[in-house]
C-alpha cells in the first residue's frame, strides 16, 4: 500500500469521527445556553439573513404551528414590507425557573413609517436540555417580571 493510499484511508476513517466530535460539541454548546443568551441569539438573527437561526430557537407554538421554513419566509416578507430594523436591544431583567423563563428586553426598532422604543417579554420553555422561545409580548408599558408565574 502506498503512502498516498494509506493517507486517504486514514482520512476516510477519521473524518466521520472528527465531524461527529464537532457536531456533538456544537449541540452541547447549544444546550448550555442560558435563556438570556438564547434571546440575544434570536434578536441577532431576527429580521436578518439569519432568520433560519432565529427559527431554530423557537417552539412550534411560537411559530403558529408552521414549519420553520414557512415561518421564516412569511415573517421575512412581513418585516421587509415594513422596512424593519433593530437599532439597539438590551436585556434588562430575567427570571428563570426549572422549566420556564422570562426575559425582559428594551429595544429600539425602526420601521417605515416610524421608530419605536419598546419592551419585549420573551417567555421561554425548556425542551429537554434547551431553552426555546415560546411566546413574545411587545409593549410600551412598565413591566414587573414578578407578575409572571414560573
Image: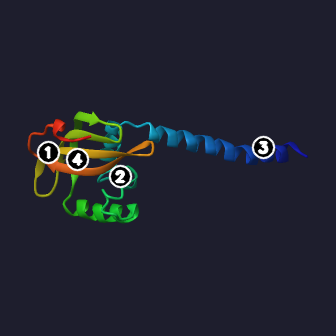
Asked if marks 1 and 2 touch (Cβ < 8 Å), the reply is: no
Residue shown at 32%/53% (left/top)?
48
| Residue that carries the numbered disc 2 in the rendered image | 58
Between the residue at mark 3 and the residue at mark 4, the CA separation in whole angstroms equals 48 Å
- Residue wearing tag 4: 86
Give the left or right position of residue 60, taking residue 115 as reference.
right
- Chain-order first, disc 1 or disc 2: 2
Q: Nearer the viewer, mark 3 or mark 1?
A: 1
Q: Position of residue 59 (x, y in %)?
A: 36, 54
Q: Between 113 and 137, which is closer to the camera in this rendering?
A: 137
Residue that label 1 marks? 118
**Front of the two marks 2 and 4:** 2
Between 56 and 8, the residue placed more toward the observer is 56
Q: Secondary structure at mark 4?
A: strand
x and y percentages locating residue 100 in the rendered image: 31, 42
Q: What's the residue at 37%, 36% (across, down)?
A: 34
User: Which quarter of the picture shows residue 82?
Assistant: bottom left
Within-10-Å neighbours for mark 4: few <14, some 14–19, many 20+: some
Report which residue position mark 3 lands on. 10
As displayed, is residue 75 above or below residue 135? below
Q: Residue at x 40, y 52 (%)?
A: 56
Q: Quadrant of residue 145?
A: top left
- Dot 3 or dot 2, earlier in sequence: 3
Between the residue at mark 1 and the residue at mark 2, the CA separation in whole angstroms equals 21 Å
Q: 129 or 43: nearer the eye? A: 129
Closer to the N terminus: mark 3 or mark 1?
Answer: 3
Q: How far apart are the alpha carbons under marks 3 and 2?
A: 40 Å
Say whether disc 2 or disc 4 marks the residue closer to the N-terminus.
2
**Secondary structure beneath label 1:** strand
Q: Position of residue 57 (x, y in %)?
A: 37, 49
Residue at the spot 45% in from the left edge and 42% down from the top edge: 129
Amino acid at each position: 500500500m502506498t503512502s498516498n493510499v494509506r493517507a486517504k484511508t486514514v482520512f476516510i476513517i477519521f473524518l466521520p469521527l472528527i465531524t461527529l466530535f464537532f457536531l456533538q460539541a456544537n449541540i452541547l454548546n447549544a444546550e448550555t445556553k442560558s435563556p438570556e443568551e438564547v434571546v440575544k441569539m434570536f434578536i441577532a438573527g431576527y429580521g436578518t439573513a439569519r432568520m433560519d437561526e432565529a427559527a431554530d430557537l423557537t417552539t412550534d407554538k411560537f411559530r403558529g404551528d408552521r414549519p420553520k421554513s414557512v415561518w421564516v419566509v412569511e415573517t421575512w416578507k412581513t418585516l421587509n414590507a415594513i422596512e424593519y430594523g433593530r437599532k439597539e436591544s438590551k436585556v434588562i431583567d430575567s427570571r428563570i425557573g426549572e422549566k420556564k423563563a422570562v426575559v425582559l428586553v428594551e429595544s429600539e426598532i425602526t420601521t417605515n413609517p416610524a421608530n419605536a422604543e419598546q419592551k419585549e417579554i420573551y417567555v421561554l420553555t425548556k425542551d429537554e436540555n434547551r431553552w426555546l422561545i415560546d411566546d413574545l409580548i411587545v409593549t410600551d408599558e412598565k413591566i414587573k417580571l414578578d407578575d409572571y408565574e414560573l
